[in-house]
Image (cartoon, rainbow, N blue to C red):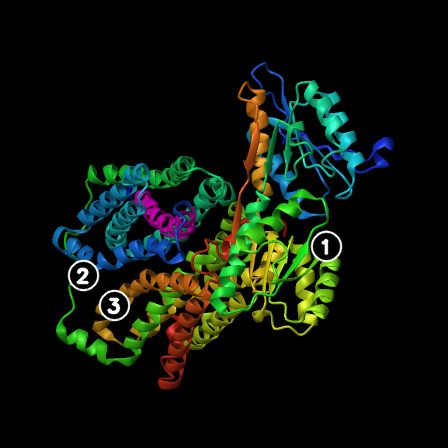
């Protein structure tokens, strides 16, 4: 690790977010003797998902004799910081950029400008709109993630003789990753839109407090809810709090989620409050992304298309016919602390 | 020079023994196996030690210690070399075979090297030589763990990356990871071959036969078995070795599975355990001069049980530190049980010692039980009920000694320990 700099917000950038520059292993590695530089733009760094992604990107850049420049927004909606980071990275002549868009459409003009300069751009975790705006997308197969927990919930209900009264705690209207997870869950469980077994549905924005509030409202309307789908683990943890506050015996409820963060795996999946979660891997998004850009910069093929970065069903209560990994696997491969 | 080489032997088997503790988790990751399957590493290793104990004595009696040392060195080196075809074939069972051969050689070596060290110089300094040589065993043990922690664990392919690999990529990653296992064992094999050559072609004046390896008579065996202090002592030693092997086998796995410590950092907790074990030994020697050995054994066994319970119930760093702390309780057990069980046996003591050493079988069997419990209950932490139960047996033995014969629990045993 030759040099590591943290740049404080500049006047322009300070208005819209935080830009952090991290330079890793700044040694010459390209065929032409120029150093290879990879840019990484994450959504924000309060969420350990993005911290893990940056840390792995740093490690892999070091292994590949590349420099990593990273930038991040202040929140999941901080688009301006990302656009500014794209412009700066383009101006500095990076070889490639990995970006997790905070807004799938708003970042596209800056991405197009980068690609016009010959910079390879890979979207990680979240697709752009249109998807063709980038060279490639490296992300979780969100539909598959939903399908895995849907199949698990259905199998558990069948095994335990549970009458399915399904509650859906979704993300928000129009956000594709949330829609795909929901579609996958319904398909995995064997539910059609409007199925009478779906007794209620709320939007949580993936937020713990909104997950708790939404679950509380649904329980008031339908106290017999027995299956709970949550779009992510913060929403799931909120739902657990509402169910426990409502006096529900958690062994009578099958609650499933998507994410695979350490907090939820250790505090909720391990004791069985969350029955199963679909674990996604920011490590793979970062690793494969940095490798692809470094390889392309050294004369290899330019990355294209969609790379599924993997998803595994984690549960402490496996059911026949549904492939899963145990909680220990989940702990070993979770992100965050 | 020959003495220096034998000292290297003591270090080599310490290194090999504790490198296997690392291998259990490594093979589990590479072959994507259950905990029970991966614990077969210890079954192969300690099973070989048990199986070869008597043949080793017979080799020494029939051909002399030099032949025993050379046979042990040769067999152990062959075991190390067998890692080459094993890593090319990518067959787990082949690795178990290599480990069995390696451990078989080390078993013979260990049986032969102690008397060899005594016989290779003046009688007046024999004890000094033996103590010096044996001091290098824990040094080797720490080097073994260090080799694994530095060379193997940090470089393993991450499990997350395997999730998206094709079958061809998975096989390539297996080859790459198994290639990491190879160098430490080839290094050990190379050292053993070098020692073999230097000893084989050097004229050494050592006794061909040794009366001490004579086999027990039926009368001695009956007398020993009829002695409850000895009989229960063998059982206690079996469970002590079992507890030690269980704890060290699954320390790295506990760190990774329960706390989420990264592979590159998890090896340091096993290293800390061994260092604590070493330091505690000196502390225990001091305490044995103050307290009755059986009483200290009871206290430390109870402490070990308490640590196991913390490991089961506290699924965080505290639990991991409790796992490390168990090594403090283990540090005095083997020599203390050895001394207490053999106390007052007279001429039967030398036969009785063989029975206590063969209690090493506990190290072969109980890790499989712990692995099976972890798999069946789906909890790495709950597996620590197994070493906890083992240490409870040791505590019960200490209590039995204290209650049945005050002289056996007395301070006069400190010298025996």
Q: Is residue B398 magenta?
A: no
Residue at x 29%, y 39% (from the top left corner): B89
Horizontally, residue B264 falls left or right of residue A233, namely left
Residue at x 65%, y 53% (from the top left corner): A232
From which residue to which does the magenta span run?
A: B3-29
Are discs 2 and 3 less than 8 Å apart at CB? no
Q: Where residue B59 sits: x, y (%)? A: 16, 53
Indicate the chain on which mark 3 is placed: B
Q: Where residue B125 sits: x, y (%)? A: 31, 54
Q: Which residue is mark 3?
A: B355
Q: Which residue is mark 1?
A: A203
Classified by dominant secondary structure, the portion drawn in magenta counts as helix
Q: Is residue A206 above or below residue B312?
A: above
Horizontally, residue B144 falls left or right of residue B119, namely right
Q: Is residue B235 above or below residue B103?
A: below
Q: Earlier in the sequence, mark 2 or mark 3?
A: 2
Horizontally, residue B11 falls left or right of residue A225, namely left
Which type of secondary structure does the marked residue at label 1 adopt? strand
Task: Pick the residue in front: A89 or B253.
Answer: A89
Q: Is residue B126 visible?
A: no
Q: Any mark on residue B213, and which? A: 2
Which type of secondary structure does the marked residue at label 2 adopt? helix
Q: Residue furthest bottom?
A: B404
Say yes or no: labels 1 and 2 on the same chain.
Answer: no
Horizontally, residue B319 falls left or right of residue B229, namely right
Marks 3/1: CA distance? 69 Å
Q: Is residue B5 magenta?
A: yes
Residue at x 60%, y 69% (from the top left corner): A250
| Picture quarter with the C terminus of chain B | bottom left
């Amino acid at each position: 690790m030759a040099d590591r700099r943290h740049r404080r917000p500049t006047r322009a950038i300070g208005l819209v977010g935080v830009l952090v520059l991290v330079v890793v292993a700044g040694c010459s590695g390209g065929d032409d003797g120029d150093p290879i530089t990879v840019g990484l733009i994450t959504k924000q760094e309060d969420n350990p998902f993005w911290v893990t992604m940056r840390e792995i990107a740093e490690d892999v850049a070091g292994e590949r004799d590349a420099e990593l420049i990273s930038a991040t927004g202040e929140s999941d909606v901080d688009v301006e910081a990302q656009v500014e980071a794209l412009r700066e990275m383009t101006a500095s002549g990076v070889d490639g950029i990995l970006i997790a868009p905070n807004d799938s459409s708003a970042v596209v003009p800056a991405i197009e400008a980068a690609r016009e300069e010959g910079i390879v751009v890979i979207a990680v975790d979240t697709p752009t709109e249109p998807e063709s705006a980038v060279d490639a997308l490296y992300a979780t197969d969100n539909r598959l993630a939903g399908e895995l927990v849907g199949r698990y919930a259905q199998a558990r209900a069948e095994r335990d003789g549970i009458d399915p009264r399904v509650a859906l705690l979704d993300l928000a209207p129009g956000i594709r990753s949330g829609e795909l997870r929901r579609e996958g869950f319904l398909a995995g469980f064997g539910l059609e839109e409007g199925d009478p077994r779906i007794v209620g549905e709320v939007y949580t924005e993936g937020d713990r407090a909104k997950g708790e509030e939404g679950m509380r409202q649904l329980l008031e309307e339908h106290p017999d809810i027995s299956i709970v789908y949550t779009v992510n683990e913060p929403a799931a943890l909120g739902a657990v709090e509402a169910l426990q506050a409502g006096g529900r015996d958690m062994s009578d409820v099958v609650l499933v989620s998507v994410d695979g963060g350490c907090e939820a795996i250790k505090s909720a999946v391990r004791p069985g409050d969350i029955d199963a979660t679909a674990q996604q891997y920011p490590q793979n998004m970062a690793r494969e992304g940095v490798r692809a850009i470094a390889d392309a910069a050294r004369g290899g093929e330019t990355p294209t298309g969609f790379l599924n970065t993997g998803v595994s069903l984690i549960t402490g209560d496996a059911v026949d016919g549904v492939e899963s990994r145990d909680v220990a696997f989940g702990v070993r491969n979770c992100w965050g602390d | 020079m020959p003495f220096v080489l034998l000292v290297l032997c003591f270090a080599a088997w310490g290194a090999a023994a504790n490198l296997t503790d690392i291998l259990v988790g490594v093979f589990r990751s590479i072959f994507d196996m259950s905990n029970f399957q991966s614990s077969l590493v210890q079954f192969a290793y300690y099973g070989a030690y048990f199986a070869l104990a008597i043949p080793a004595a017979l080799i020494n009696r029939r051909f002399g210690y030099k032949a025993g040392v050379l046979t042990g060195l040769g067999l152990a080196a062959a075991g190390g070399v067998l890692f080459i075809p094993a890593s090319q074939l990518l067959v787990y069972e082949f690795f178990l075979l290599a480990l069995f051969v390696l451990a078989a050689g080390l078993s013979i070596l260990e049986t032969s090297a102690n008397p060899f060290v005594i016989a290779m110089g003046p009688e007046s300094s024999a004890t000094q030589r033996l103590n010096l040589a044996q001091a290098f065993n824990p040094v080797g043990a720490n080097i073994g763990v260090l080799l694994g922690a530095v060379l193997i664990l940090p470089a393993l392919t991450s499990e997350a990356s395997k999730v998206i690999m094709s079958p061809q990529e998975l096989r390539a990653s297996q080859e790459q990871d198994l290639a990491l296992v190879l160098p430490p064992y080839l290094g050990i094999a190379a050292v053993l071959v070098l020692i073999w050559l230097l000893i084989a072609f050097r004229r050494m004046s050592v006794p061909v036969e040794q009366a001490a390896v004579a086999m027990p008579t039926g009368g001695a065996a009956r007398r020993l078995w009829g002695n409850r202090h000895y009989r229960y002592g063998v059982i206690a030693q079996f469970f002590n070795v079992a507890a030690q092997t269980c704890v060290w086998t699954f320390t790295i796995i506990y760190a990774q599975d329960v706390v989420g410590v990264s592979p590159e950092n998890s090896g340091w907790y096993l290293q800390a355990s061994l260092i604590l074990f070493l330091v505690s030994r000196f502390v225990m020697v001091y305490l044995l001069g103050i307290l009755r050995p059986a009483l200290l054994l009871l206290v430390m066994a109870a402490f070990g049980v308490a640590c196991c319970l913390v490991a089961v119930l506290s699924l965080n760093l505290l639990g991991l530190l409790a796992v490390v702390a168990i090594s403090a309780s283990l540090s005095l057990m083997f020599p203390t049980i050895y001394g207490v069980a053999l106390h007052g046996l007279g001429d039967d003591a030398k036969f009785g010692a063989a029975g206590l050493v063969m209690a090493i079988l506990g190290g072969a069997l109980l890790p499989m039980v712990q692995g099976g419990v972890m798999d069946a209950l789906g909890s790495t932490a709950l597996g620590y009920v197994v070493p906890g139960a083992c240490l409870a047996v040791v505590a019960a033995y200490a209590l039995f000694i204290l209650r049945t014969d005050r002289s056996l629990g007395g301070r006069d045993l400190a010298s025996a320990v």
